[in-house]
């Protein structure tokens, strides 16, 4: 998910901003212009975002991974030397294009009909736009989008193995996606699951406030007025976080970047005692 553009832009405004404000202003600028890292942004990515804003508006377009997050995920694909990636939630194609480029850098070449990146998305319209964007990016041979409800289609991938699984669709189903990926052995032995949007935003109110900030260490009573779906999303992600935290099958670490991403790896049986 991309950051919102900051309202403070002039030197005078920045000089009077609080440390907290400066932190989010820097976070935004790094996310759109990640000049602190080795650039690995596929050339068509800025245009994919621009076109998505033009078609669906900025609020919806922000569902796409930011440049910085895409680069971070590229790095992870390199780190595990991934050959195949499964993405649950493809939208207009940004993260899939990042993944395809990262696989190319790993030396993966598409062969036959079994493409190295599989995307699942419930929206036929988004999938159509994504496929057009893949062609413009020259990675159409690398990515296949399966249109339909991932809650049904994920299990049908049993028998296929992926080194990276990216969870980025409906937040209320993360737990089911996670369980299916593990139970159907869809995750490679040394693979990783990347779960997006696992902290901050609407998840935060469900997390107990630690003492000494609050004596009763209770969750916040946030009303989410007018946005009941955000409450449902936050609650589901909080329950997902708690579930994986206690799950002996895996080890997970939440990275407090973007809106929070959790990296999860399977523990093998000998580590599991
Ligand atoms: C946050 S967006 C994905 C953004 C994308 N990964 C990117 O970086 O551009 C979430 C996507 O999940 C899809 N989605 C929501 N519920 C779904 C479901 N049950 N099955 C499959 N896709 C779903 C939506 O259509 C949307 O395109």
Image: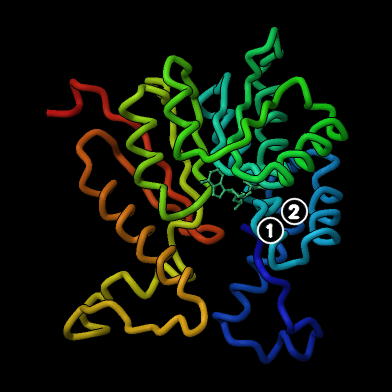
Residue 176 position in % (x across, y down): 36, 42
Specify the quadrant that holds the N terminus.
bottom right
Specify the quadrant that holds the C terminus.
top left
Residue 191, image quadrant: top left
Question: Are the residues flagged by discs 2 and 1 in contact, CB closer than 8 Å?
Answer: no
Q: Nearer the viewer, residue 191 or 63?
A: 63
The residue tagged with tag 2: helix, strand or loop? Answer: loop
- Marks 2 and 1, Cα distance to the nearest angstrom? 9 Å
Residue 158, image quadrant: top left
Which residue lies under the disc numbered 2?
35
The image shows residue 5, relative to residue 14, as above or below, that is above
The image shows residue 40, relative to residue 204, as above or below, that is above
**Would residue 179 appear left or right of 140 to someone viewing this image?**
left
Which dot, 2 or 1, sits closer to the camera? Answer: 1
Q: Nearer the viewer, residue 264 or 64?
A: 64
Which residue lies under the disc numbered 1?
31
Residue 83 position in % (x across, y down): 58, 19
Say which residue appears at 33% left-offset and 52% top-offset: 240
Say which residue appears at 71% left-offset and 77% top-offset: 6
Local crowd size for mark 1, using a 10 Å CA cut-off: few (<14), some (14–19), many (≥20): many
């Amino acid at each position: 998910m991309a950051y919102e553009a900051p309202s403070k832009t002039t030197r005078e405004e920045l000089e009077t901003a609080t440390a907290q404000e400066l932190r989010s202003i820097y976070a935004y600028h790094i996310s759109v212009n990640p000049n602190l890292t080795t650039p690995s942004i596929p050339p068509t990515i800025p245009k994919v975002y621009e076109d998505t804003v033009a078609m669906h508006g900025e609020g919806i377009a922000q569902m796409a991974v930011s440049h910085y997050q895409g680069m971070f995920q590229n790095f992870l694909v390199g780190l595990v030397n991934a050959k195949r990636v499964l993405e649950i939630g493809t939208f207009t194609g940004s993260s899939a294009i990042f993944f395809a480029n990262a696989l190319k850098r790993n030396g993966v070449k598409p062969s036959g009909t079994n493409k190295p990146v599989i995307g699942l998305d419930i929206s036929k319209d988004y999938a159509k736009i994504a496929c057009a964007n893949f062609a413009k990016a020259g990675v159409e041979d690398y990515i296949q989008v399966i249109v339909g409800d991932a809650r049904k289609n994920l299990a049908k991938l049993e028998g296929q193995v992926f080194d990276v699984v990216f969870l980025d669709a409906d937040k209320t189903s993360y737990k089911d996606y996670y369980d299916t990926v593990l139970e159907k052995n869809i995750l490679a032995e040394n693979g990783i699951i990347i779960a997006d949007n696992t902290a901050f935003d609407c998840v935060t109110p469900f997390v107990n406030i630690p003492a000494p900030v609050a004596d009763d260490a209770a969750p916040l009573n946030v009303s989410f007025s007018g946005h009941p779906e955000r409450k449902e999303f936050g609650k589901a992600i909080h329950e997902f976080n708690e579930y994986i935290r206690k799950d002996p099958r895996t080890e997970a670490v939440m990275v407090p970047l973007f809106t929070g991403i959790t990296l999860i790896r399977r523990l093998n049986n000998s580590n599991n005692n």
